[in-house]
Image (cartoon, rainbow, N blue to C red):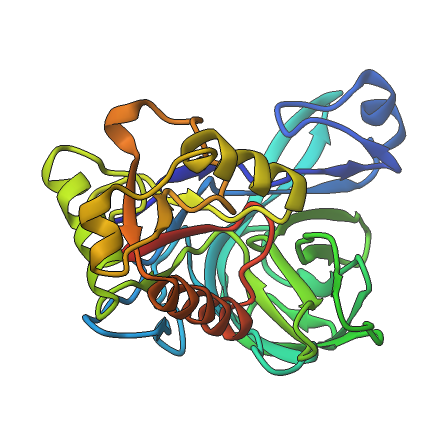
Amino acid sequence: MRNHIVRSLTVSTLAAGLLVPAAGLSQAAVERSAASAVIQADIAPVAVQTAPPATAAGAVAVAPKANATCRVDTILINRFSECEWATVRVKVIRVINNVPRQVGTATFTVRHSMTLNSKSANWGEKFQLSKARTTGEGKGITVNVTATAGNGTSAKTHYGPHLLDAASSGSVTYTTGPMRKGRINNKTQTRYVFSFTKPGYVPGSTGYKSATWRCDNYYGTSGCAMTDAPTAVSMVGIPWIDDGIRKLRAQGGHYGDPNGGKPLHWMINTKQKNDNRRAVCGGRTAPPDMKRVGRTYCDEYPFASTYEGGKKLPASQRETTWVSPNENNTQGARITNWRRPMHVMDHDPFYVVA
C-alpha cells in the first residue's frame, strides 16, 4: 500500500540580485547582467511515498523497518526515517545582444538519509551530492548547502563549499530544546537551500523541503517521528474486540484495514472523544445474553479517540461490540503501549490489525 503525493518542490532563481522565474529574465536583469552570466537552478518534481505499515499477527506495537529505501526523484518515508533523492538542474544564462541564452548546464542528484530517534529529540542526517553532468559554462560551479529546521528544533549543517565537478557529502545534526512532559511540538520540515557561485557570474540558488516530522514528550520520553507515515496497532488476541472488527470488514468496512483500507486518524480531544462515545454507546444496556457471560461494556469501532469515531462514518463503516470490562482495559493498555513508542499524536494516520 502506498500513498502517492506528487509535489513540485520549492524553486527559486537569483539573477543580478533579483528573484526571477526560470522561464526568463526581466528587462532590468538583462540590462544589469549584460557583462556577466547568470546562474539559475531548479528541482525536478518529486513524488512522496509512504511505506506500508509493518504488521504482524499478535503484535502489540508494530514497528517499521529501521530505514526507508531510496529511489531517484522520490521521497520514501516510514515512521522514523526518510530517504529523499532529488535531481537539481543548474543553468548558466549569458546575455548576448540583449537576449538571454543558455550557455551551460550542471545536473546532479542529492540523496538524503534521515533517521529520527524514538527515544530522543536529537538525531542526524547524511547527504551525498553526485558528480554533476556538465555542459559548456556549467563547469567550475561551486555549491554550498544549508539546512534549517524549526518549531523547537535547530539544524546544524556540516558541509563546506564544493565544486560540482566532483562528488561530495555532508551531514546535518538536529537538536531540540527541552520539552516538559505532555508537550507536543508543532509539525515542521527541514528546509534545504543550495547556493551556486562562480567567479564572474551572478549567483543562483534553489531549495526544497524534507517530509513532515514532529517531536514530542507526550508520555515523558522525548522522541520524533515522520507524521505522514502510518503505523499499526494490533487487536489480535483481544477476542471479542478483534472479532467485531473482523466481522465489520467481512461486510465491507474498510477504515483502518491495512489491507487496502483507508487509515484512521488519532484524535487528542477529550470532549470530542466523549461525544463520539455517547453517539454510538450512550444510554445502551447490554442484553441479557451478554450480561450472563460478563460482556457488559459497549466497545465501538472506529475508536472514539479518532476523527472517524462516533457517527462520522456511515453505519456500514462502523460497529459496536459488547465486551468484558477486562477486555476493554486490555485494549486501552495496548493502545497506550503502541502510541508511546510510535509517538502517535493528533491527526496521525494509523491502521488496526485484526
- Residue nearest the viewer, comparing 269 with 19: 269
Tell me residue 112's x, y (percent).
Answer: 52, 67
Q: Is residue 225 above or below residue 10?
A: below
The quarter in which the C terminus is drawn is bottom left
Considering every residue shown, the one lying at the far top of the view is 27
**Number of numbered discs:** 0
Tell me residue 157's x, y (percent).
Answer: 74, 73
- Residue nearest the viewer, comparing 15 with 299: 299
Q: Is residue 207 above or below residue 126?
A: above
Residue in the image at 70% along x and 28% along y = 96
- Residue nearest the viewer, comparing 173 with 99: 173
Residue in the image at 57% along x and 46% along y = 267
Tell me residue 39's x, y (percent).
Answer: 70, 44
Residue in the image at 73% along x and 24% along y = 25
| Horizontal side of residue 347 vs 19, given as left or right | left
- Residue nearest the viewer, comparing 321 with 253: 321
Considering every residue shown, the one lying at the far left of the view is 250
| Horizontal side of residue 299 vs 16, given as left or right | left
Tell me residue 135's x, y (percent).
Answer: 50, 51
| Horizontal side of residue 36 vs 252, given as left or right | right
Whether residue 166 appears in this view of the structure is no
Residue in the image at 37% along x and 74% along y = 63
Whether residue 149 appears in this view of the structure is yes
